[in-house]
Amino acid sequence: PCPAVCNAGVGLMGPLETCSDQAMKTVFDVNFFGAVRTIQAFLPAMKRRRAGRIIISSSIGGLQGLPFNSVYCASKFAVEGLCESLAIVLQPFNIHLTLVECGPVNTSFLANLQRPDPEGSELQ
């Protein structure tokens, strides 16, 4: 059987006070809840087979905070916690999680990065 792969991701870069609620919700919806929904879709069959592998694409931003990336990093820290917890409870089912913590990669991710309008905010 093929592994389930969770590889969607979006970013939001800028001072926290300039990030709208909707933009922050979008980051969590894609980066965290997207992984959750994918895993939920595949887990029942994997548990029945008592075998499986789930590969989750994360980021070094889930291991350490990065300047002006607080929302993105928070979403990736959430993915880290999810995977660490799941790895324990899925072990008896012979389901393995692989978390790939990437650094900067030359993809369209940076071109699609959301940047809030800093108008009216002060960087100090």
Image (cartoon, rainbow, N blue to C red):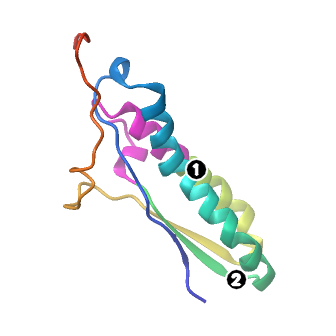
Residue 103: name its quadrant: bottom left
From the top left corner, tell me how far across and down residue 80 is, in percent: 52, 50
Front disc: 1 or 2: 1
Identified at 46% across, 37% down, the residue is 74
Query: Residue 100 or 30: which is nearer the viewer?
Result: 30
Query: Residue 113 or 35: which is nearer the viewer?
Result: 113
Quadrant housing the N terminus = bottom right
Mark 1 or mark 2: whose residue is earlier in sequence: 1
Q: Which amino acid type is shown beneath numbered disc 2? A: Ala
- The number of callouts visible is 2
Q: Using a 10 Å C-alpha cutoff, classify the residue at mark 2 as few (fewer than 14 neighbours), some (14 to 19) or many (20 or more).
A: some
Query: Which of the numbered marks, if any, corresponds to residue 94?
Result: none
Residue 77 in magenta stretch: yes
From the top left corner, tell me how far across and down residue 77 is, in percent: 49, 43
Q: Which amino acid type is shown beneath numbered disc 1? A: Phe
From the top left corner, tell me how far across and down residue 105 is, in percent: 23, 60
Residue under label 1, please give it: 33
Q: CA distance from mark 1 to mark 2?
A: 23 Å
Residue under label 2, please give it: 51
User: In the rendered structure, which segment of residues is drawn in magenta?
Assistant: 59-78
Residue 14 in magenta stretch: no
Per the image, label 1 sits on a secondary structure element best described as helix
Left or right relative to 36: residue 6: left
* Main secondary structure along the magenta-highlighted residues: helix
